[in-house]
Amino acid sequence: MTITTLKTIKKQAACELHSKIKSAEINLDSLSEIFSALPGVSILGGNFSKETADGFSYWMAMPKEVFEFRAGQVEPLEKLQQVLDKYKPSRPPLPNEMFTGGWGGFFGYELGSHLEPAPCTNTDDLRLPIIRLLFYDRLIAYDHNKKSFQLITLQLDNDTETPQQKLSFLETLLDKARDVRVPTPPPADIEDMDFSRIRSNMTKDFYLRAFDKIKRHIYDGDVYQINFSQRFCCEFLARPIDLFHWQNRYNPSPYSAYIDAGNFQIVSASPEMFITVKDGIISTKPIKGTRKRLEETSANAKQINTENLQQLIDSAKEKAELNMIIDLERNDLARLCVPGTRKVTQPRTIETCPSVFHAVATVAGKLRDDVNFCDILKAVFPGGSITGAPKIRSMQIINETEPTSRGVYTGCLGYIGLDGSVCLNIAIRTIIIKKKSAYVQTGGGIVADSDPMAEYDETITKARALIAGITAVNSV
């Protein structure tokens, strides 16, 4: 099949699904290592914490097509809809628990400036694509509950390979992974990270002055909450896949991801699900409320964790923040769902991650039949948990106060299946690697009674595990 430009697309490419189940004891890091050497690789998951999320990890490479939308271009959703319409199943898809081929990649935060009246006025110094999606006609899925692999291929019109040839290629990759042993990454003391050599896109004084400006907006009634962030930068000397291995071992996250775009890489250790669409049901799972969690190796770590957990459970401030975002997400979903079907399917719950405790909730509803993926993006992007409330005014204030564009940070990563399924994370706890530098951005929700030093310290807490991983792999 030849790759055509958007202007020359005249008909859809029919796709037929083929798959093969393989039961095999293969280290997931070994499979990630094998895939990291292939062009256009995307890995979603790859660690045991996926069991608590959607239950599947995916390895994809050798895409048939790459779609990018960049700053300076216009009409992103129109262009996106054209590429999504290009590939369609040759028959109605059967219900399937997992991703069975289609598009994988990311949407940068600045897409929001094309969807809402919130123009970007800060500096785009990294110059990453705003949208980057790759079409995958072959992938390996791992079912964490059944402990089995499934090899998945799509047969396309005018294909140069048969489905069996594609499946055989995937089997070869599994066989190679059996013989690969990924060395155990070195540990790091997350709590003892030295931030003195870590650069930021703002000084502490800049952060505190911006905090005061945001508080004035809140007192004036412009907004109820703003998610304000700072970006850290440090030297990166290792292989990007080594950092992914480190995060999966010491900081495993249910919506982790690895993307190699050639001139930059993404290592995401995100704990937050943005959108899941399955069987016509859309759900979103915002996080609001964070407390530090220590490794229980020291004598007082257990006591400190118990105290921090109880603080988060009892915090009236954190409860109010999450309730604000739940209401925002319910309003966003109202633009997409059958009336009367929206509801909070999971009330406020505390989840435990390796280095933090989080407060989360889930909102879901049944999509109307006339809704497509671009309609979903227009209604809900960017996620309310990383903008604030009301969303549009929050986005405008973020653009006025943060000195650099967010890029991938607080955008989303994941897949869009040909069968209509979607799973995208919120790209928090996400590292961008470019030109031997690693960028880590973290933030938190500021409300009327927020304490400036507590909020500043929270950005450090959230960055520690990511910076620790960078430092550890740099030392090898």
Image (tube, rainbow, N blue to C red):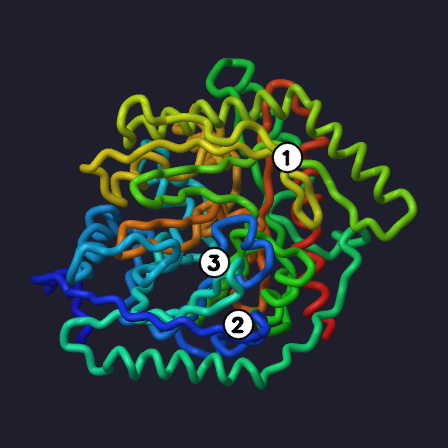
Please tell me whether mark 2 sits on a helix, a strand or a loop: helix
Q: Which residue, given by chain and number where applicable, does mark 1 sit on?
A: 350
The amino acid pointed to by label 2 is Ser
Which residue ends up furthest to the left in the rendered image?
10
Q: Which residue, given by chain and number where applicable, does mark 2 sit on?
A: 32
Q: CA distance from mark 2 to mark 1?
A: 30 Å
* Horizontal side, residue 376 vs residue 348: left or right: left
The amino acid pointed to by label 1 is Ile
User: Residue sitting at 32 percent across and 41 percent down?
Assistant: 377
The amino acid pointed to by label 3 is Phe
Q: Which residue, given by chain and number where applicable, does mark 3 sit on?
A: 56
User: Residue sitting at 64 percent across and 21 percent down?
Assistant: 317
Please state which of the two labelled residues, at mark 3 or mark 2, is closer to the viewer: 3
Mark 3 or mark 2: whose residue is earlier in sequence: 2
Mark 3 or mark 1: whose residue is earlier in sequence: 3
Please state which of the two labelled residues, at mark 3 or mark 1, is closer to the viewer: 3
Q: CA distance from mark 3 to mark 1?
A: 23 Å
Please tell me whether mark 1 sits on a helix, a strand or a loop: strand
User: Does residue 183 sit above or below 191 in this rendering?
Assistant: below
User: Does residue 323 sit above or below 443 in this rendering?
Assistant: above
**Are the residues flagged by discs 3 and 1 in contact, CB closer than 8 Å?**
no
Residue 233 image offset from top left, x and y in percent: 62, 56
In this view of the protein, can residue 42 be seen by the observer?
A: no
Residue 453 image offset from top left, x and y in percent: 73, 31
- Image quarter where the N terminus lies is bottom left
Residue 247 in which image quadrant: bottom right
